[in-house]
Amino acid sequence: MTKPWAITLGALDEKLGIQVLEQSAQRVVATMPVAGNTQSLNRLHGGATAAFAEALGSWCALIHASTMDKVCAGVDLNITHHRGATDGLLTGTATPVHLGRTITSHEIVVTDEQGRRICTARITNQLIEPR
């Protein structure tokens, strides 16, 4: 088995202001500010939340995949927005629903500073050989 991959922020992750707090194949936790990630009405942009959730779930999948010398590619993302936000810091937590040899599924829960659920997402990643 190979040493697990360590999260490296991409350009979009940096623009979103994501900060990683915890990382393993069993759990990835990170934060993202609402400020700088709003839409025209000064509310949290659903696309920013979806990108945040996708990053966390994909990172969790990639850490798992890396232990088998594989990488991953997202094949499905769905997200339900439960409430809006206009300020503060969001916390996202990705946990596996299924960790297989060829596919993974993760649930990502994003909450606000009061612990209220902002959204719930699910991502499925296919595990593939690196090119």
Image: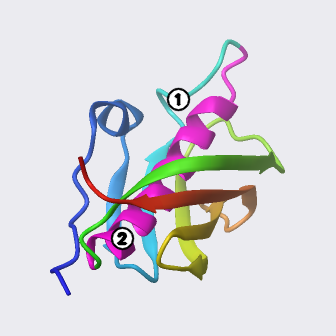
Judged from the image, the secondary structure of the residue bearing numbered disc 1 is loop
Q: CA distance from mark 2 to mark 1?
A: 30 Å
The spot of residue 13 in percent (x, y) is 36, 39
Taking the spot 40% from the left edge, 79% from the top edge, the residue there is: 25
Q: Residues within 10 Å of mark 1 (few under 14, many from 20)?
A: many
Taking the spot 56% from the left edge, 70% from the top edge, the residue there is: 104
Q: Is residue 99 magenta?
A: no
24, above or below 18, in the image: below
Left/right placement of residue 78 relative to residue 90 reads: right
- Pick whichever, 20 or 75, lies toward us: 75
The spot of residue 54 in percent (x, y) is 54, 49
- Pick whichever, 100 or 60, lies toward us: 100
Type of amino acid under label 2: Ala
Task: Determine which residue is flagged by label 1.
Answer: 37
Q: Looking at the image, do the residues carrying marks 2 and 1 touch, with CB atoms under 8 Å apart?
A: no
The spot of residue 26 in percent (x, y) is 45, 83
Q: Quadrant of the N terminus?
A: bottom left
**Number of marks:** 2
Q: What is the span of residues highlighted in magenta in the rendered image?
A: 41-67
Type of amino acid under label 1: Asn
Task: Determine which residue is flagged by label 2.
Answer: 65
Taking the spot 43% from the left edge, 70% from the top edge, the residue there is: 28
Q: Residues within 10 Å of mark 2 (few under 14, many from 20)?
A: many
Taking the spot 69% from the left edge, 28% from the top edge, the residue there is: 43
The spot of residue 78 in percent (x, y) is 74, 48
Left/right placement of residue 68 relative to residue 73 reads: left
Q: Does the rendering let one see residue 65?
A: yes
Nearer the N terminus, badge 2 or badge 1? 1
- Which picture quadrant has residue 5? bottom left
30, above or below 82, in the image: below
